[in-house]
Image (spheres, rainbow, N blue to C red):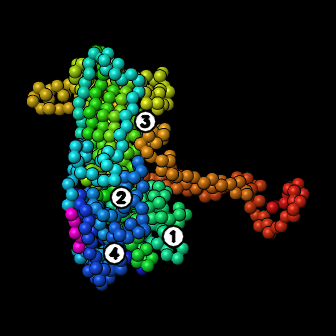
């Protein structure tokens, strides 16, 4: 509101250079040769970065599972349109962009893998030849006797579902300013970082630095939504700084770059799913088969998005048996990254759509079939077939309140009138459970180490009893200062006030036989 927020493109350091990135125009091709001599000779250009520098100075980015990552600049071949191939640091962004046009890249085209079905087809080209497959991960989970549940069912409803790749589009794209101190070998990165500690750990690994040599400063962000990580842009700016004698380098992603290959794309999925039901609408079992397209790398930890549905796999319903068959593949598309909800929304679409299909087959109202299958209030805490526990809830009461607020009966009458007049009017009813705090061990099943995004809090008590709490957060405009408001220190008593007026104790030396009992109780030390 005041205009005082320091967004990253408002931030500058003395001697700062500006970066521009040359990106691949091919989905799959081997890099035969890169000639950057003309770009480096352009007045105002201070450094050109290529895959050769990456091989010398950096590791592929961290992935889950391990071993499915790329360098932040293409090394040997490109795997998607928009993959960074070379980068320039110059006195201005204008000069850097001009220099990109002077870089000559010779490609040898390779057969592309355009989507997930093509990735698992016989004879498909391999993105990672050393892996011998495009399948990043394959697992299945079976809870209860799912075969018996379907064999005993009066009805089985099944369908295929396609969730097309989506992505956020925040007002502010990613940006960073990186400085590599060549004397102390310390990297400092300012940027629009949504998970600064996580990014710092990743940069330490990717750039071969000790963790105490990487400092990440998160600036206010014009939107995050999961994609404000920027590992590639950060690595590129950092290594350009290293190559430009330690001068700071700013990289601001433009809108075309973001849309083409930014870290906001996610959830490219193919589902086959089915429900087993009794004639009265009671659901006996739920099967899901998922084919998930991670794109050209598992660097965005998108595998977490196929694991997170485990935390609320059967939604708000008493479904006793379930089956989850997931296959995660690589294709020649931009890598997927976290996005709002991190995975459950497509899963919820599948489950809720099947509930609607079952309602039609059994001639039940969509709200009523949900009511008949809800976990009841007296059943909480409730353990799902997948092993996760819901602590509390009253789903029937929530549904009743929502239907009353919407005048559901009146809407159905209006719908009937509209359809009688030839107008197609739909009414949607959905019940979903959004996982909050839950068992992070589910992530370990898809090769994710640790326990999520590391954060922490410091609590200190001073000599007069004042408590100081230090909590960190990245600032995306949600009003975090109303949750953790800064408050002035407060003296709690006259005694504390008197203590604060005492002079600071002089430095003291304790003999070997020192004992606290030798000091008078009134001593300020």
Tell me the SS state at disc 3. helix
Q: Residue at x 40, y 40 (%)?
A: 308
Q: Residue at x 23, y 58 (%)?
A: 28
Tell me which corner region of the image, top left, top right, bottom left or bottom right, holds residue 70. Answer: bottom left
Residue range highlighted in magenta: 104-108
Query: Horizontal and vertical percent for residue 344?
Result: 36, 39
In the rendered structure, which disc, 2 or 4, sits on the residue that comes first in sequence? 4
Alpha carbon of mark 2 to alpha carbon of mark 3: how far?
A: 30 Å
Query: Horizontal and vertical percent for residue 135?
Result: 32, 45
Neighbor class of circle 1 (other Cα within 10 Å; few <14, some 14-19, many 20+) is some
Mark 2 touches mark 1? (CB < 8 Å): no
Provide the residue designation for mark 3: 311
Q: Is 115 or 268 nearer to us in this picture?
A: 115
Provide the residue designation for mark 2: 70
Alpha carbon of mark 4 to alpha carbon of mark 3: how far?
A: 46 Å
Does residue 67 show up? Answer: yes
In the rendered structure, which disc, 1 or 4, sits on the residue that comes first in sequence? 4
């Amino acid at each position: 509101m005041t205009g005082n927020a320091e967004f990253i493109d408002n931030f500058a350091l003395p001697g700062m250079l500006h970066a521009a990135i040359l990106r691949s125009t091919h989905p799959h091709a081997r890099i035969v040769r890169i000639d950057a001599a003309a770009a480096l000779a352009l007045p105002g250009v201070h450094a050109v970065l290529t895959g050769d520098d990456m091989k010398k100075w950096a590791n592929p980015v961290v992935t889950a599972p391990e071993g499915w990552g790329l360098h932040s600049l293409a090394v040997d071949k490109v795997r998607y349109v928009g993959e960074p191939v070379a980068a320039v640091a110059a006195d201005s962004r204008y000069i850097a962009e001009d220099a990109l046009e002077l870089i000559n890249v010779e490609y040898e085209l390779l057969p592309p893998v355009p989507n997930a079905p093509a990735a698992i087809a016989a004879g498909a080209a391999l993105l990672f030849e050393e892996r011998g497959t495009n399948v990043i991960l394959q697992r299945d989970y079976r809870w209860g006797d799912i075969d018996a549940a379907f064999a005993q069912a009066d009805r089985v409803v099944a369908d295929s579902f396609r969730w097309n790749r989506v992505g956020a589009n925040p007002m502010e794209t990613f940006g960073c300013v990186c400085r590599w101190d060549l004397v102390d070998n310390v990297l400092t990165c300012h940027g629009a970082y949504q998970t600064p500690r996580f990014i710092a750990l990743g940069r330490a690994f990717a750039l071969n630095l000790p963790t105490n040599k990487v400092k990440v400063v998160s600036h206010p962000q014009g939107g995050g939504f999961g994609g404000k990580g920027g590992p590639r842009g950060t690595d590129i700016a950092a290594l350009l700084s290293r190559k430009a004698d330690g001068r700071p380098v700013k990289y601001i992603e433009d809108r075309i770059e973001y849309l083409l290959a930014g870290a906001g794309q996610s959830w490219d999925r193919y589902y086959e799913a089915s429900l087993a039901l009794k004639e009265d609408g009671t659901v006996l079992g739920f099967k899901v088969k998922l084919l998930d397209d991670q794109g050209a790398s598992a660097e965005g930890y998108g595998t977490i998005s196929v694991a997170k549905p485990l935390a609320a796999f059967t939604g708000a319903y008493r479904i006793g048996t379930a089956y989850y068959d997931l296959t995660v593949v690589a294709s020649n598309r931009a890598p997927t990254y976290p996005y709002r909800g991190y995975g459950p929304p497509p899963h919820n679409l599948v489950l809720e759509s099947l509930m609607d299909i079952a309602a039609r087959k059994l001639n039940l109202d969509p709200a009523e079939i949900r009511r008949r299958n809800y976990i009841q209030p007296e059943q909480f805490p409730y353990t799902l077939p997948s092993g996760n526990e819901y602590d509390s809830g009253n789903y029937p009461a929530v549904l009743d309140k929502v239907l009353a607020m919407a005048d559901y009966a009146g809407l159905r009458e209006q719908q009937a009138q509209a359809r009688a007049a030839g107008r197609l009017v739909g009414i949607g009813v959905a019940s979903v459970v959004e996982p909050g705090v839950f068992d992070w061990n589910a992530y370990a099943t898809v090769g994710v180490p640790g326990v999520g995004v590391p954060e922490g809090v410091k609590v200190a008590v001073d000599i007069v009893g004042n408590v100081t709490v230090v909590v960190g957060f990245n600032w995306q405009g949600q009003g975090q200062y109303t949750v953790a408001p800064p408050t002035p220190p407060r003296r709690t008593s006259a005694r504390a006030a008197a203590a604060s007026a005492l002079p600071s104790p002089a430095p003291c030396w304790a003999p070997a036989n020192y004992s606290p009992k030798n000091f008078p109780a009134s001593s300020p030390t």
